[in-house]
């Protein structure tokens, strides 16, 4: 038996700005809006609280949909509340949406619309629609509910309340994943955050789509040709996952579903990502970059996802370092190389510290000395300065610099030989 729900509870949310509902209704009246509703995550979470009172999550933002012009409605709402309370109003005409910040609360207002995907994984074509059509375009049934503000009516056309009671979520359509593969990442995000399961039909849809790869672009093709939902939009979903969600659980789900193949086949079979990302987190490296580093073709994947150029360069430098270390014929016991040898190898080949740290996170045979260089050796300085050497009779120039470097490396070796315990690094496993 389903637990009862109370749609009016959304009007009592402590997160709502003071006088917000009155201003919403006044703005609707002024702009001729007949239908105005809370939608999406705010409705889902309020209904979940109604079903499970102990399951309380503070709302971080509020989504509204209007049948009509979101821009005109938002401008009227700002007039109702006053400029001192509205710190941001940003219109996105292409998406028929408006972002507002009211009393430090993020409000997203959208015109009711439907979406048509002319090509799978490409951006949809938008057109004005009813509130019901707007709900039908969404990703999951638990996110496709609305509470109308002008008449307190709950719209649940896709079994959202039933799924909340079952702690399960389902895609809305049989082509949800084909149209927009970023929904796979969202499925992992939401099920991990809410401790829900994805429906059997949802799992089948993911695995069937990945198995037949219905998108026009193939992973063997140039990364810059990939459609948005396999490129920049996919990156955005991954960034949200790493920033806001329990990402270890979400990544585990993606791998269990076979869905990391959406990124790279190598990542689907990669069992070392927990260690790699755990160390990347401890070293304050980009988690997305650390994930990509385990791919079969990390540079291509980074280019396809359009991650920042500095992170793409970091991956290239890490690959360069890996090849360099292979060519250097490092002994099986890496301790046979003195610290000075490691410093020369890393520093004279223009390897940035972040690339060294990222390579160490990969768990290569040389991870210990790489960590030691990153954490300690690179910071050690000679006991004398250039001024000291000049006072001793040295002439400014390359030879003075070489002498300073010799003294520094000598100090690195001596410090390591005298107090090796300072350089111990726990196993990244």
Image (cartoon, rainbow, N blue to C red):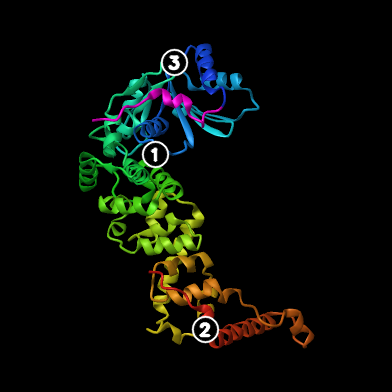
- Foreground: disc 3 or disc 2: 3
Q: Secondary structure at mark 2?
A: helix
Where residue 352 appears, x then y in whole percent? 53, 67
Q: Which residues are magenta?
A: 1-17
**Residue underneath mark 2:** 420
Image disc number at residue 150: 3
Number of marks: 3
Relative vertical location of residue 243 with respect to residue 321 in this rendering, above or below = above
Q: Which residue is farthest right?
A: 391
Magenta stretch, main secondary structure, is: loop
Where residue 161 appears, x then y in whole percent? 30, 30
Image side of residue 117 versus residue 378, left or right: left
Q: Secondary structure at mark 3?
A: loop
Residue 122 occupies which quadrant of the picture? top left
Residue 6, magenta (yes or no): yes
Question: Camera-side residue: 352 or 413?
Answer: 413
Counting residues from the N terminus, which is met first, the one under dot 3 or under dot 2? 3
Q: Residue at x 77, y 88 (%)?
A: 392
Distance of mark 1 from mark 2, alpha carbons? 52 Å
Distance of mark 1 from mark 3, alpha carbons? 29 Å
Question: Callout 1: few (<14), some (14-19), or many (20+) C-alpha neighbours within 10 Å?
Answer: few
**Residue underneath mark 1:** 54
């Amino acid at each position: 038996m389903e637990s009862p729900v109370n749609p009016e509870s959304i009007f009592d949310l402590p997160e709502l700005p003071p006088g917000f509902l009155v201003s919403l209704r006044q703005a609707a009246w002024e702009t001729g809006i007949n239908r105005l509703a809370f939608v999406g995550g705010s409705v889902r979470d309020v209904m979940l609280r109604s079903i499970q009172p102990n399951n309380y999550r503070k709302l971080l933002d509020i989504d509204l949909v209007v049948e009509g012009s979101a821009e005109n409605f938002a401008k009227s709402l700002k007039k109702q509340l006053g400029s001192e309370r509205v710190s941001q109003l940003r219109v996105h005409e292409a998406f028929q949406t408006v972002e507002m910040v009211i009393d430090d609360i993020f409000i997203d207002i959208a015109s009711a619309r439907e979406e048509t995907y002319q090509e799978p994984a490409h951006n949809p074509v938008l057109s004005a629609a009813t509130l019901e059509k707007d709900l039908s375009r969404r990703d999951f049934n638990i996110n496709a509910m609305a509470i109308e503000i002008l008449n307190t009516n709950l719209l649940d056309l896709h079994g959202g309340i039933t799924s909340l009671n079952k702690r399960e979520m389902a895609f809305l359509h049989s082509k949800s994943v084909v149209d927009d593969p970023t929904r796979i990442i969202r499925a992992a995000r939401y099920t991990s955050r809410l401790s829900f399961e994805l429906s059997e039909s949802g799992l089948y849809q993911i695995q069937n789509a990945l198995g037949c790869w219905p998108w026009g672009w193939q992973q063997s093709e140039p990364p810059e040709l990939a459609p948005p939902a396999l490129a920049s939009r996919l990156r955005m979903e991954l960034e949200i996952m790493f920033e806001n969600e329990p990402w270890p659980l979400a990544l585990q789900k993606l791998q269990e579903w076979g869905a990391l193949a959406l990124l790279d086949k190598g990542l689907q079979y990669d069992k070392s990502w927990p260690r790699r990302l755990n160390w990347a987190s401890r070293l304050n490296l980009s988690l997305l970059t650390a994930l990509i580093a385990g791919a079969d073709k990390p540079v291509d994947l980074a280019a396809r996802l359009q991650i920042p150029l500095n992170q793409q360069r970091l991956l290239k430098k890490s690959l360069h370092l890996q090849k360099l270390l292979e060519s250097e014929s490092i002994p099986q016991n890496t301790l046979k190389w003195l610290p000075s040898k490691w410093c020369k190898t890393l520093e004279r080949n223009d390897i940035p510290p972040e690339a060294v740290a990222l390579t160490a996170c990969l768990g290569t045979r040389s991870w210990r000395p790489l960590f030691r260089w990153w954490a300690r050796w690179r910071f050690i300085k000679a006991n004398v300065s250039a001024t000291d050497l000049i006072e001793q009779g040295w002439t400014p120039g390359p030879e003075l610099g070489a002498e300073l470097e010799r003294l520094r490396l000598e100090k690195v070796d001596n410090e390591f030989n005298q107090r090796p315990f300072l350089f111990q690094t726990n196993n990244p496993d």
